Image (cartoon, rainbow, N blue to C red):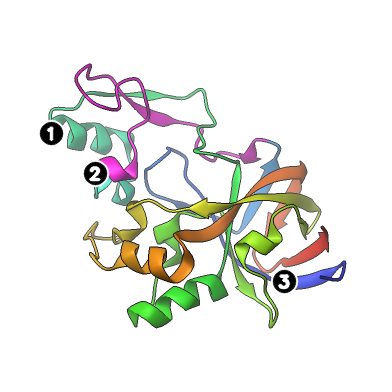
Amino acid sequence: MEARHPLGTLIGLWRYPVKSLAFEALERADVREAGLAGDRRSALFVMSSNHARHGKTFRGKEHNLLHTLREPAAALALAERDGVQLERCSEGPYFDARPVSLIFDRWIAELEGVLETKIDPLRFRPNLFASARASLPAESELVGAVLSVADVELRVVEPIQRCVTPSYDVTSGERNPHFQRAVVETRDNIMGVYCTVERPGTISLGDAIVFERA
């Protein structure tokens, strides 16, 4: 791919102040080496000694309603009803893998064609959601590339392997039993890419996403 090749336009910008809880929509974000300012700076840790996640973060796959909640107190109460004790820690960031995640609408459109329904990109909890230009490589073909968004530079480091949580509706928590199988069979269980921050700066909705170099 040629240098300075436009890939698309930023149309969604989200952070998740408490890991695994609801999103916060942004129009503008400061992007630092540790990710978007305010993203996943807190997390809920399992304190119940008999729980498989003892000492680790309580994630969306542990409860289908977790992503629908905005307040940590509500999440603590939800888990307590199931006999799980949680504790909030605020010494993050707490990322599963890398500080920034990016998804293009064209990748999601492949899945929409199989499921024959519109898919809310927030099911995949990205930081950046972009409308693609005419030519867009698959996730694996972007690994190693440096992308620019305004004055920020991101390096694509790996495709994102998906778990069960995108099959939960972001509003109701209801699970679509066909969703995960479709991701596996249609896209080899991949949706989106993880990035590291090569050059910090500020990004805004409407910014172009440009392939700078391999």
Whether residue 164 is situated above or below residue 120 in the rendered picture: above
Q: Mark 1 points at which residue?
A: 82
- Front residue of 76/115: it is 115
How would you rate the neighbour count of disc 1 (Cα within 10 Å): few for under 14, some for 14-19, many for 20 or more? few
Q: How far apart are marks 2 and 1 (CA)?
A: 10 Å
Residue visible at 60% across and 41% down in the picture: 99
Q: Tell which circle, 1 or 3, labels the residue nearer the N-terminal end.
A: 3
Is any atom of residue 200 visible in this view?
no
Indicate the position of residue 69 as horizontal and vertical percent values. 30, 46
Whether residue 179 is situated above or below residue 56 in the rendered picture: below
Residues shaded magenta: 34-63
Q: Mark 3 points at which residue?
A: 7
Q: CB of mark 2 within 8 Å of CB of mark 3?
A: no
Q: Name the residue under label 2.
A: 63
Would you say residue 45 sits in the magenta stretch? yes
Q: CB of mark 2 within 8 Å of CB of mark 1?
A: yes
Amino acid type for the residue under numbered disc 2? His
